[in-house]
């Protein structure tokens, strides 16, 4: 009897996993019906979209273009921001941002200067999910920002005299590498200017350049080899996104004031710093998940807690009809579906610039998306 009971539990769990996965495939709709939901290996969930009828408004437009070097389809936001991830649940979009660098030769002449700038209108660079990093042994850099008519600047510096002073074990400790948090602001514009105290003359043999960049927190791992040459040209940066209250509404919206939220199982959360409702986000109500921006809204789904309750009931009961039957597993599928049954839902352009200014390469990517 005990063996049969354990087999019954195994069958129950096995069928539950199959049904939940099947349900998830139905519920995890990303894009509007009839719209593409993927560009290359990146999911493009609504309110973002790849064509005019597939995004909330032009501020959420994503273009799918072939990368010049790899030929692979690549999602582009604005004019030149490569997108690597979009999260509806976290309201994040991950983009690639250029690494700034300033290099010198043995004569002390500057041979390369790349300044990085970022200009966003809809997005804001996350202050809690990114870090500002400076690499070098004769190095410092400024990050300049502009927000709501206010200019501000922050910096980071790193000084060392010998390669042996720098170890990989210390991480970004201020010796060879400096790292600091970004200000907790809604950064839409920033620029990075790398500098040197003495043109790297005393450390030229192992560190001819200063590198500076913003990068997704915990993504960057320091290596002493980076002092000779930092190979990365771009690094991931996390930006937050919200919905403007005056954003154009789709005709099927249930709430014209907060028209982006779909269905009846969504929660509207104002996100403006001053507590006003000029910006907001849509989230699934407790007990629901999915994409709250789709017209059908969020879906109910059996949770592991519900399954645990059912299994505990079987354990206490100590006996189940399955334990006395040898019928194939499929014969009990209907009963299993009943045990974990779930309710059906009863509810029915962008302007982003990344600039890379190089006096060596004479490249200026100063774009203004439409």
Image (cartoon, rainbow, N blue to C red):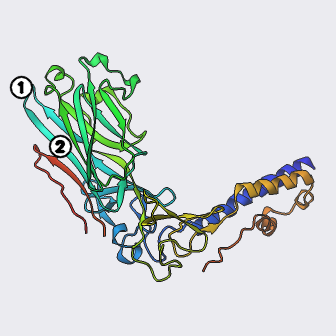
Residue 349 placement (x, y as % from top left)? 31, 70
Q: Name the quadrant containing residue 215.
A: top left
Is the residue 222 above or below the residue 338 in the image?
A: above
Mark 2 and mark 1: Cα distance apart in space: 20 Å
Q: Residue sitting at 64 percent across and 65 percent down?
A: 22
Please, is residue 74 above or below residue 113 in the view? Answer: below
Indicate the quadrant where residue 158 lies.
top left
Q: Which residue is mark 1?
A: 107
Residue 333 sits above or below residue 109 on the image? below
Q: Residue furthest bottom?
A: 251
| Mark earlier in primary sequence (2, 1) | 1
**Disc 1 crowd, CA 10 A, few/some/many (<14, 14-19, 20+):** few
Left or right placement of residue 369 versus residue 292 in this view: left
Residue at x 18%, y 34% (from the top left corner)? 195
Spot occupied by residue 283 in the image (x, y as percentages of width and height):
54, 63
Q: Which residue is mark 2?
A: 114
């Amino acid at each position: 009897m005990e063996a049969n009971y354990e087999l019954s539990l195994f069958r129950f769990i096995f069928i539950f996993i199959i049904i939940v996965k099947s349900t998830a495939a139905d519920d995890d709709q990303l894009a509007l019906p009839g719209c593409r939901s993927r560009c290359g290996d990146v999911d493009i969930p609504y309110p973002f979209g790849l064509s005019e009828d597939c995004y909330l408004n032009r501020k959420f437009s994503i273009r799918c273009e072939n990368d010049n070097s790899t030929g692979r389809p690549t999602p582009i936001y604005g004019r030149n921001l490569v997108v690597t991830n979009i999260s509806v649940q976290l309201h994040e979009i991950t983009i690639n941002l250029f690494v700034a660098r300033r290099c010198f030769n043995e004569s002390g002449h500057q041979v390369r200067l790349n300044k990085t700038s970022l200009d966003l209108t809809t997005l804001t660079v996350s202050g809690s999910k990114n870090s500002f990093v400076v690499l070098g042994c004769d190095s410092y850099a400024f990050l300049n920002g502009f927000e709501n008519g206010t200019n501000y600047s922050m910096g980071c510096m790193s000084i060392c005299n010998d390669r042996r002073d720098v170890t990989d074990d210390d991480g970004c400790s201020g010796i060879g590498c400096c790292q600091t948090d970004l200000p907790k602001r809604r950064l839409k514009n920033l620029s990075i200017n790398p500098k040197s105290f003495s043109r790297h003359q005393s450390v030229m043999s192992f560190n001819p350049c200063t590198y500076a960049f913003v990068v997704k927190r915990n993504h960057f791992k320091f290596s002493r080899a980076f002092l000779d040459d930092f190979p990365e040209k771009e690094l991931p940066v996390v930006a937050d996104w919200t919905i403007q209250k005056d954003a154009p509404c789709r005709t099927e919206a249930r709430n014209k004031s907060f028209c982006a939220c779909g269905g009846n199982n969504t929660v509207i959360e104002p996100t403006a710093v001053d507590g006003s409702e000029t910006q907001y986000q849509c989230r699934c109500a407790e007990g629901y998940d999915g994409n709250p921006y789709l017209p059908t809204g969020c879906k109910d789904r059996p949770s592991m807690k519900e399954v645990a309750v059912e299994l505990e009931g079987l354990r206490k009961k100590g006996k189940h009809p399955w334990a006395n039957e040898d019928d194939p597993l499929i014969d009990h599928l209907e009963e299993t579906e009943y045990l974990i049954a779930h309710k059906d839902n009863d509810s029915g352009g962008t302007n982003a610039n990344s600039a890379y200014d190089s006096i060596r390469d004479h490249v200026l990517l100063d774009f203004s998306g439409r």
